[in-house]
């Protein structure tokens, strides 16, 4: 992983929006660059529930429906798995495909139902 990508991912993990903005301003191609596990900045932000950062990444061209190589998970699926309601809602409202399936043939709704998270279920069914 490049030093720039490491810096961007670290800023996302530590919820430093201003550092994320600087990193992508300096090199916008970082937004959809993958780490050695196939994660993009949007995947990392969805995992950590950083809705403000997710918003910034999406506005700068992050691929909403990118699926990780091995598990075929999207940012929406990951946000749901981690119970990040605001992030999941934002992704749905901005065009995330709720019908995509991962390597286990599960959708984001399947994960919400598995967790019995009624709010996420409602978001994904609306």
Image: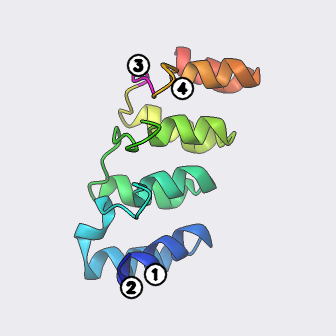
Residue indicated by mark 3: 99
Mark 2 — residue? 3
Label 1, label 4: how far apart the Cα atoms are: 29 Å
Q: Secondary structure at mark 4?
A: helix
Q: Left or right of 117: which side holds 76?
A: left
Categorize mark 1 by other alpha carbons within 10 Å: few (<14), some (14-19), many (20+).
some
* Front position among marks 4 and 2: 2
Q: CA distance from mark 1 to mark 2?
A: 6 Å
The earlier-in-sequence mark between 2 and 3 is: 2
Q: In the rendering, at what x and y percent does residue 89 appear? A: 54, 35
Q: Secondary structure at mark 1?
A: helix
Q: What range of the chain is rendered magenta?
A: 98-102
Q: CA distance from mark 2 to mark 3?
A: 35 Å
Is residue 117 something that shows in the picture? no
Q: Quadrant of residue 120?
A: top right
Look at the numbered discs 1 and 2 and tell me whether their residues touch, using CB distance below 8 Å: yes
Query: Do the residues bearing badges 1 and 4 touch, measured as CB atoms within 8 Å?
Result: no
Q: As drawn, is 25 to the left or to the right of 35? A: left
Q: Quadrant of residue 67?
A: top left
**Disc 4 + disc 2, Cβ < 8 Å:** no
Residue contact at pointers 1 and 3, CB within 8 angstroms: no
Do residues under tags 2 and 3 come within 8 Å of each other at their CB atoms? no
Q: Is residue 16 left or right of residue 72?
A: right
Residue with the mark numbered 4: 108
For this rendering, which residue is in front, 58 or 66? 66
Which residue shows up at 48% across the image and 19% down it? 105
**Is residue 45 highlighted in magenta?**
no
Which residue is denoted by mark 1 in the rendering? Answer: 7
């Amino acid at each position: 992983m490049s030093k720039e990508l490491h810096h961007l991912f670290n800023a996302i993990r530590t919820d430093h929006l201003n550092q994320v903005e600087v990193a992508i301003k300096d090199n916008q191609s970082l937004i959809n660059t993958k780490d050695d596990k196939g994660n993009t900045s949007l995947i990392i932000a969805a995992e950590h529930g950083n809705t403000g950062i997710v918003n910034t990444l999406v506005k700068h061209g992050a691929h909403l429906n990118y699926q990780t190589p091995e598990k075929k998970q999207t940012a929406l699926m990951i946000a749901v798995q981690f119970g990040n309601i605001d992030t999941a809602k934002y992704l749905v409202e901005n065009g995330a495909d709720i019908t995509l399936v991962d390597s286990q043939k599960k959708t984001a709704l399947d994960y919400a139902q598995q967790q019995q998270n009624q709010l996420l279920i409602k978001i994904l069914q609306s």
